[in-house]
Amino acid sequence: MSSSPNAPPLMSFTDLMALEPMKVGPSGQATDQNRFRSLAAAWAPGVRNTRSYGGHTMAQAVYAASKTVGKGYTVHNVHGNFSLAGLIDRPFIYTVQRIRDGDSFCTRLVTVRQSKEKGWGDAASRVDDASCSGICFTCICSFVNRHDDADEADVDPDYAHRQEESNLREKFRSVLGDKKPIDHRMAPGVDVPLYIALEDEKGLTDPCPGVSVRRVDMAAFNAPLASSPTYTRDYRQLQYYTTIGALPSIHEDPNLHFCAHIYAIDRNSLFAIAYALDIQDRLAKVASISISVIFHSAPRHLAFERPSSEGRSADDQQRWFCQEAGTDRAGSGRALHVSKIWDERGGDGAGARHVASTYQEGLLYVPRKSSSSPSISDAGGEHKAGGGLKGGSQEMPFLTKMSEEERLKLKRGNGKL
């Protein structure tokens, strides 16, 4: 199988998030410790797409903010808003404003821009606001000062850890069975039927750098709910994710582990809403407006490496997390994606720990049924996704323009792209 023409090599998450302080002054010898630029190109989902994946911008913005906090502070919530689409042919520039530094909490505001000119040369490390485009992303992130067990050491054990009980393997037995995360299909570049058919038909894969994401086929779980009046509310999508390449230990750089979660949770998130609303074949525009992520657990529960004391082989040291997603509100052209992040504690699901929650507002545009059926996008024409809209992070990539007859044939499985 081949990768999309625009997909960079599958680099490690550590390399993908690499930052350097911006240079200041005429000689460029000094650096600004509150301003950083990215060193690796962001991923662009889909074929012939030049707009960057929104999860990259958000994760790296938080990582830039983490460079300005003291040792022992880890991010516990982030609230971000997208305003312009990012481009993959130039670095992101992250400006961190120190809102407050307290003994227990500190707060940072991060604004993200890109140069008006494409390129990755040395000149890109000295751009100023005048040579930058408008702000494409803004976030407020809060960091808490706690060591791995400090949050529970002085708390009544009856109240130290409360959550909804969930055995994922039991609840989703019809779709999980005895499969390991790696046994599930790689998440498609864009999670809509036409794009999945494109991948299958042309032997195409569109892997995401930095993280490995596996999409669970939920048909056996969701199909019995189809006649229920609460189908949209009860619909679920699961995906597993882990990092590519080794990360520094959770003690050495805990915020990089947290940022890997932030990066992964935006993967195809809004398309899960489309399936819940049964509009996956009719989407014309999709874009992220805002995302909030709240971490509930101590760093050790969010680390991607497994403690060696668990007695696992070297090949099984990587920890997978499971994102359980759904929606409970849509209207006015917008919808809410809600998810819980679970640590299955070794893959058997017993006593799964709820380690984080996410809330994402997205724009979903579906033309009236009386309108002519649109292609997912119009090659050579207006970009039909977030890049052409205010507030867009996720792009609907360009697909081959098709007639309605071709679309129907493809959906039935007897058409050729």
Image (spheres, grey):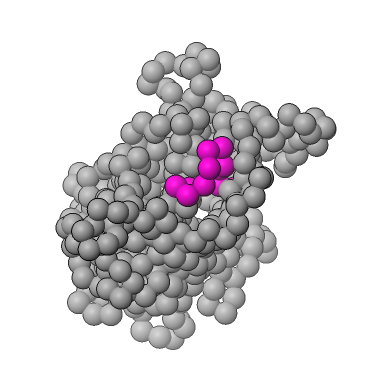
Q: Position of residue 313 (x, y in %)?
A: 42, 16
Segment colored magenta: 66-78
Residue in the image at 66% along x and 29% along y: 149
Residue in the image at 22% along x and 45% along y: 9
Q: Is residue 153 found left or right of 360 in the rendered image?
A: right
Q: Where's the N terminus, which quadrant? A: top left
- Vertical relation: 99 (above or below) 72: below
Q: Position of residue 236 (x, y in %)?
A: 57, 52
Q: Is residue 170 found left or right of 265 in the rendered image?
A: right
Q: Position of residue 152 (x, y in %)?
A: 72, 32
Counting the numbered discs, the total is: 0
Which residue ends up furthest to the bottom in the rendered image?
A: 370
Instruction: Examine the rendering and report whether any part of residue 384 can be seen.
Output: no
- Vertical relation: 101 (above or below) 369: above
Magenta stretch encompasses residue 70:
yes
Q: Residue 164's image quarter?
A: top right
Residue in the image at 27% along x and 51% along y: 39
Front-most of 17 and 317? 17
Q: Is residue 236 found left or right of 37 in the rendered image?
A: right
Q: Is residue 311 found left or right of 4 in the rendered image?
A: right
Front-most of 367 and 74? 74
Q: Where's the C terminus, which quadrant? A: bottom left
Front-most of 101 and 153? 101
Residue in the image at 27% along x and 66% along y: 127
Instruction: Examine the rendering and report whether any part of residue 166 can be seen.
Output: yes
Q: Position of residue 308 (x, y in %)?
A: 48, 17
Front-most of 326 and 248? 248
Magenta stretch encompasses residue 399:
no
